[in-house]
Image: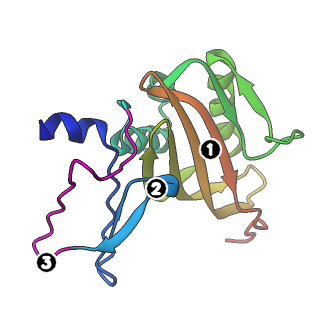
Amino acid sequence: MLAQATRRIWLYERHAPATNLLVLGCGVGAVATQRPPDGLVTIDKGDEMPMYDNPVSVKLLQDFADAWNRHDLDALMSFMADGCVFHAVAGPDLFGRSFVGLDAVRDGFRLAWMTFPDAAWVDGEHFVCGERGVSESTFLGTKADGSRVEARMVDVFTFRDGKIAVKNAYRKDRPPITGA
């Protein structure tokens, strides 16, 4: 019974050693509490927790990030749902430049490495809450003119059927680092 319940309850736990804080749930219903000394948390049947049948986990986002750092386009596309959308960090529209559909998203991902051949995403942290997820990292990359970008960024994801339906990328608008 417990194994079944834990598959359906989204339980986000982030242990900050300085505060010994435990966060349960997601969104408006999240509850922060002190971690018990034994480290075990009991959830009573009556406790209200968001319920999701979502096959997506933090591991999916970590594996997706690893594929970006390997510059492995085929692996990246294996995470994307049919009819997916990628909103790039820059572009003329409200959402930056949008790439719609598997072929266009593949081109958009490829364009990131064409712009920054040495692109890397480091210090990644990820969380999943129902059909949404976030990856936070530091983007590092050098353009052809030698200017270097180093800025914090987030990707906001929407999932469908265990895959990424939308990847919406945001990056701090920090001036390029020159003469590095």
Q: Earlier in the sequence, mark 2 or mark 3?
A: 2
Q: Earlier in the sequence, mark 1 or mark 3?
A: 3
Q: Say which residue appears at 87% left-offset and 39% top-offset.
A: 93
On the image, numbered disc 2 is attached to which residue? Answer: 29
- Give the structural element (helix, strand or loop) at label 1: loop
* Residue 146 horizontal/vertical position (percent): 73, 58
For disc 2, the neighbor class at 10 Å (few under 14, some 14 to 19, many from 20) is: few
Distance between mark 1 and mark 2 Cα atoms: 42 Å
Three-letter residue code for mark 1: Pro
In the rendered structure, does residue 81 fall within the stretch colored magenta? no
Q: Position of residue 162 (x, y in %)?
A: 41, 26
Residue at the image position 49 percent from the left and 35 percent from the top = 131
| Residue 63 vs residue 56, the one in the foreground | 56
User: Badge 1: how crowded within 10 Å, few (<14), some, or many (20+)?
Assistant: some
In the picture as drawn, the residue positioned furthest to the front comes out as 46
Residue in the picture at 33% in, 42% down: 59
In the drawing, does residue 4 fall left or right of residue 168?
left
Residue 54 x, y percent position in the rendering: 38, 31
Q: Which residues are magenta?
A: 36-52
Asked if disc 1 and disc 3 are in contact, CB closer than 8 Å, the reply is: no
Provide the residue designation for mark 3.
37
The three-letter code of the residue at mark 3 reads Pro
Callout 2: SS: helix
From the image, give the main secondary structure of the stretch colored magenta: loop
Q: Residue at x 51, y 31 (%)?
A: 159
Q: What residue is pinned by disc 1?
A: 117
- Is 75 above or below relative to 90? above
Q: Secondary structure at mark 3?
A: loop
